[in-house]
């Protein structure tokens, strides 16, 4: 069992809850933020091992949150998975240029996303993660 912490950032409460419940069922600790400013504050308080980040949000969008986290000395190493309805190749390319671990378009398959998260965490030092 892992003690990995995941920060879910999305302004859609239905998606927040879907992700939170599924991640907690897998044994992850989960914190939620609904806008970019809250995401940065939650990052500092929760110290997540991975961030699931929506792009289109109020206050600060996901691009800016990602840029700030990737520029921070205490946050640059934390993998970010962008979750977005924006499916254009230019958006995916921009995410990759920012250094994200993955870019997932909505709607997404929750099981595939959980598998991807487990793989990313394993690559970032959380050992052979065995979901329940």
Image: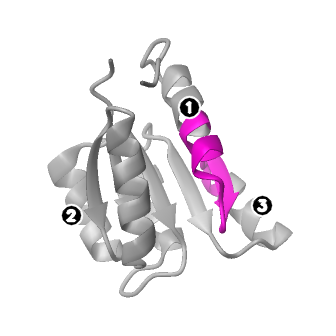
Q: Inspect the magenta stretch and tell me whether residue 101 lies in it.
A: yes
Helix, strand or loop at label 3? It is helix
Q: Earlier in the sequence, mark 3 or mark 1?
A: 3
The quarter of the picture where the N terminus appears is top left
Over which residues does the magenta segment extend? 98-115
In the rendered image of this protein, does residue 63 appear above or below residue 129?
A: below
Report x, y in % for residue 115: 59, 34
Q: Earlier in the sequence, mark 2 or mark 3?
A: 2
The residue at 35%/52% (across/down) is 21
In the rendered image of this protein, does residue 115 appear above or below residue 72?
A: above
Helix, strand or loop at label 2? It is helix
Q: Are marks 2 and 3 in contact (CB under 8 Å)?
A: no
Report the residue marked by disc 3: 93
Q: Which mark is residue 132?
A: none
Report the residue marked by disc 1: 120
In the rendered image of this protein, does residue 110 appear above or below residue 11?
A: above
The residue at 19%/47% (across/down) is 46
Report x, y in % for residue 61: 47, 78
Can you see residue 35?
yes
Report x, y in % for residue 14: 41, 73
Dot 1, how many residues are within 10 Å of its Cα: few (below 14), some (14-19), or many (20+)? some
Q: Who is closer to the viewer here, 3 or 37?
A: 3
Q: Earlier in the sequence, mark 2 or mark 1?
A: 2
Dot 2, how many residues are within 10 Å of its Cα: few (below 14), some (14-19), or many (20+)? few
Report the residue marked by disc 2: 41
Q: Is residue 83 left or right of residue 121?
A: right
In the rendered image of this protein, does residue 84 appear above or below residue 32?
A: below
Helix, strand or loop at label 1? It is helix
């Amino acid at each position: 069992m892992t003690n990995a912490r995941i920060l879910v950032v999305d302004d859609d409460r239905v998606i927040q809850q879907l992700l939170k419940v599924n991640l907690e069922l897998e044994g992850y600790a989960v914190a939620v933020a609904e806008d970019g400013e809250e995401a940065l504050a939650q990052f500092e308080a929760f110290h997540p091992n991975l961030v699931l980040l929506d792009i289109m949000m109020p206050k600060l969008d996901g691009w800016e949150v990602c840029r700030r986290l990737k520029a921070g000395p205490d946050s640059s190493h934390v993998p970010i998975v962008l979750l977005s309805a924006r499916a254009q190749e230019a958006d995916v390319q921009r995410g990759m240029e920012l250094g994200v671990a993955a870019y997932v378009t909505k709607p997404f398959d929750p099981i595939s996303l959980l598998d991807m998260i487990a793989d990313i965490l394993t690559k970032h030092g959380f050992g052979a993660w065995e979901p329940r």
